[in-house]
Image: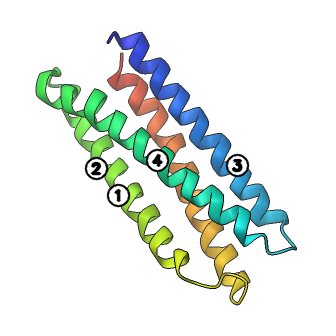
């Protein structure tokens, strides 16, 4: 796969993630109806998307950069790989915690936790973008 193909695929995944978390953010911010069902559906859709994105980055970008990359790309790949793994762990911990809880019974706590993880995901994607473009250049 050529670098433009990798960049395009990365950008496509990243865009999908940003759209998805924006939708969840809008529901969390405006929801007066405690729409936990829709948020649960979005959460599980995002689990699948994040898993695909993470697998793509690790297999197609990080591993080759660490194995074959120039010495200036390997540290960036290591840092991005660690950051990706950390946000993935944080999101999965959030999913595990809130998958078994009656969200309607503790709606405000749930909204706060959802808003916090959404912001972390958004911050991660924003920070990762420029470094990933350097890695893929």
Q: Which residue is mark 2?
A: 82
Instruction: Determine the secondary structure under disc 1.
Output: helix
10 or 71, nearer to the observer: 10
Q: CA distance from mark 4 to mark 3?
A: 15 Å
Q: Residues within 10 Å of mark 2 (few under 14, many from 20)?
A: few
For the residues bearing labels 3 and 1, Cβ distance under 8 angstroms: no
For the residues bearing labels 2 and 1, Cβ distance under 8 angstroms: yes
The image's mark for residue 50 is 4
Q: Residue at x 72, y 71 (%)?
A: 36
Q: Earlier in the sequence, mark 3 or mark 2?
A: 3
Q: Is residue 2 left or right of residue 12?
A: left
Q: Is residue 87 left or right of residue 23?
A: left
Q: Earlier in the sequence, mark 3 or mark 1?
A: 3
The image's mark for residue 86 is 1
Q: Residue at x 40, y 32 (%)?
A: 131
The image's mark for residue 29 is none
């Amino acid at each position: 796969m050529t670098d433009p193909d990798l960049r395009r695929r990365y950008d496509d995944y990243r865009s999908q993630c940003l759209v998805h978390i924006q939708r969840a953010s809008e529901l969390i911010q405006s929801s007066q109806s405690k729409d936990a069902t829709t948020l649960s559906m979005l959460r599980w859709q995002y689990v699948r998307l994040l898993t695909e994105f993470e697998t793509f980055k690790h297999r197609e970008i990080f591993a080759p950069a660490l194995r074959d990359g120039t010495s200036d790309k390997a540290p960036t790949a290591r840092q991005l790989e660690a950051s990706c793994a950390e946000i993935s762990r944080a999101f999965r911990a959030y999913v595990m915690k809130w998958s078994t809880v009656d969200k309607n019974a503790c709606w405000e706590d749930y909204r706060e936790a959802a808003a916090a993880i959404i912001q972390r995901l958004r911050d991660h994607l924003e920070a990762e973008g420029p470094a990933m473009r350097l890695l893929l250049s």
